[in-house]
Image (spheres, rainbow, N blue to C red):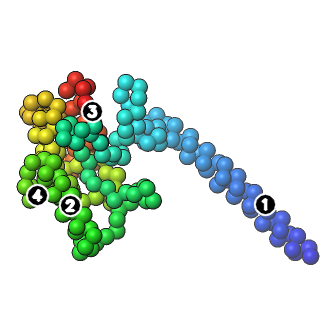
Amino acid sequence: MNTLVKQTWAGLRVLVVLTVLLGILYPLAVWAIARIPGLESNAEGSVVTQNGQAVGSSLIGVDPAPADPAHDPWFHTRPSAVTPEMPSGASNKGPYNEDLVKAIQERRAAIAQREGVSPDQVPPDAVTASGSGLDPAISVAYADLQAQRVARNTGLPLDRVKQLIDQNTSGAGIGVPGVNVLPLNLAVQAAAGGAH
């Protein structure tokens, strides 16, 4: 009986110590580190604000929905495999999956129609989802494809829209040029006088 009591007390002490360490001290340390200047934005979701209001995140791509699809003034992000049941993640469908092939063909046809080009001019990232389904950036080719429609629907000169694309293009730390859609759309909106 004495051994059982000793083992029970030892187990309870380990439980209390681990609860304090992992349930209280570790979360507090993570919270405190997230408050260090320079890290706070990332810890809070990299929220982008305009005029004091949150307009999106610089790390999470959200495809804008135009009020009138026939007069769409926005640049669009990559498609997403996200569903209400699965808020983040890829479809896990391979390149020979009939459903994926069909979805890509439908996306290609829809984008070609929206942009007024032939389907073979639609770049791959316009029709394929990223690994997380939340990628905030698109290729320069996809941004260039959308430039004419955005210029037409905002009233901005095409050269000005292309200049905004160039200003919002970066290597994103990996050297591959990409365009973050949210800052680009905010720049277009500002250049067009905020009407959209």
Q: Secondary structure at mark 2?
A: helix
**Residue type at numbered disc 3:** Leu
Which of pointers 2 and 4 lies earlier in the amino acid sequence?
2
Instruction: Check whether the beta carbons of the residues at disc 1 and disc 2 lie within 8 A of each other.
Output: no
Instruction: Check whether the beta carbons of the residues at disc 4 and disc 1 lie within 8 A of each other.
Output: no
Q: Which residue is mark 1?
A: 13
Between the residue at mark 1 and the residue at mark 3, the CA separation in whole angstroms equals 56 Å
Between the residue at mark 2 and the residue at mark 4, the CA separation in whole angstroms equals 10 Å
Where residue 108 appears, x then y in whole percent?
A: 17, 58
Extreme-right residue of the structure? 1
Q: Please identify, in this view, whether the residue under mark 1 or under mark 3 is nearer the observer.
A: 3
Where residue 31 appears, x then y in whole percent?
A: 56, 43
Which of pointers 3 and 2 lies earlier in the amino acid sequence?
2
Dot 3 alpha-carbon crowd within 10 angstroms: few under 14, some 14 to 19, many 20 or more? some
Between the residue at mark 4 and the residue at mark 1, the CA separation in whole angstroms equals 66 Å
Q: Which mark is residue 106?
A: 2
Q: Which residue is mark 3?
A: 186
The answer to whether residue 119 is above or below residue 141 is below
**Residue type at numbered disc 2:** Glu
Which of pointers 1 and 2 lies earlier in the amino acid sequence?
1
In this picture, residue 24 sits left or right of residue 120: right
Which of pointers 3 and 4 lies earlier in the amino acid sequence?
4
Q: Please identify, in this view, whether the residue under mark 4 or under mark 1 is nearer the observer.
A: 4
Q: Report the number of discs.
A: 4
Between the residue at mark 1 and the residue at mark 2, the CA separation in whole angstroms equals 61 Å
Q: Please identify, in this view, whether the residue under mark 2 or under mark 4 is nearer the observer.
A: 2
Quadrant of res 143: top left
**Residue type at numbered disc 1:** Arg
